[in-house]
Amino acid sequence: MKKPLSAALLLAALAQPLRAEPMPMDCAALTLALRAVDGYSFTMPPAGPDGDWCVLDDAAWRATGPGRPDLTAERFRLKGTADGDRLVSLEVDLSGLRVAFQAGDATVDDRLRGLFRLQSAELRFVAMVVGESGLVTLQGGVLRLSGGTEVIFNATAEAGGLGTASLMAGSLTAAEVTWRNDGRLLRPVMEVLGERLVDGVTGSAAVDAARLSLRQIADNLPDSALTEDARSELGQALDALPQGRGRLVLSFSASEGIGAAQVLMAMLGDDPLGPDGLSALFRGATLDALWMPGLDQ
């Protein structure tokens, strides 16, 4: 026979607030962060919602100073839910994103200016808080450029929330990234990087300098953090840069996570990208890599 619930326990149970289901957020709440981006003025044409989606098509971020590009999006949809005043999910569907540096901005290299001008992008992902677990997941992430470059990403973090403060205080515990190199995008980027790394080099010599620097960083990764074939696969991917077309799949896991605090401590070291700095940063982490040459994978 079940023991009857006492009056005191019954009253205590009834006094507990019922947990409400997360509710859809309206456009005004969803766009607060977009309007608060430092160094930009945000505008969007008036449009009503489409179901739970907030329609921000033809939105624009205009830079208010040099060194920052203007951003425009042909299609921009946001959907979010909140538990009280706490954001618990956010979905982004964006396409026709264009990046344009101001013509008279002398702080931007002309090669990079032209590279961005020729590309448009689409971006999709869903971020959500997993119940009361303190986990935040990023799922279905896709960044695709019109030239053919593509990045597919998923991640899990111990963060407790989607707010900026929660994410900054959180730790990345797992991630998978698939990068598709179309063989056309990276050469001007590597030229600029190489010229900044080594005085007096230009063209192919600058590309070689950038590749050598990236290879050195990969060689500095600790053996304890790499799976059996990861170093070889990373080396093949870097040797193929910039024209080598293919897909690089990176899988990361860390039971303790890597957060902003660990990154900051590593950056304050004497040689943050050297063997000691990377060993400290990747302590307890595992990194796997797979390089698949060609774009038919």
Image (cartoon, rainbow, N blue to C red):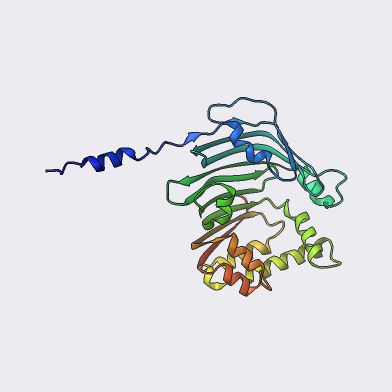
Q: Position of residue 103 (x, y in %)?
A: 86, 43
Which sits in the foreground, 181 or 273? 273
Residue drawn at the location 54% of the way across and 54% of the way down = 176
Q: Position of residue 44 (x, y in %)?
A: 70, 31
Residue drawn at the location 54% of the way across and 67% of the way down = 229
Residue drawn at the location 68% of the way across and 41% of the way down = 36
Tell me: residue 98, above or below residue 151.
above
Report the number of numbered marks: 0
**In the picture, which quadrant includes the N terminus?**
top left
Q: Quadrant of residue 168?
A: bottom right
Tell me: residue 110, above or below residue 51.
below
Tell me: residue 55, above or below residue 167.
above
Which sits in the foreground, 216 or 232? 216
Residue drawn at the location 84% of the way across and 62% of the way down = 202
Name the outermost residue toward the left. 1
Q: Position of residue 104 (x, y in %)?
A: 88, 45
Which sits in the foreground, 157 or 285? 157
Query: Is 126 displayed left or right of 113 in the figure?
Result: left
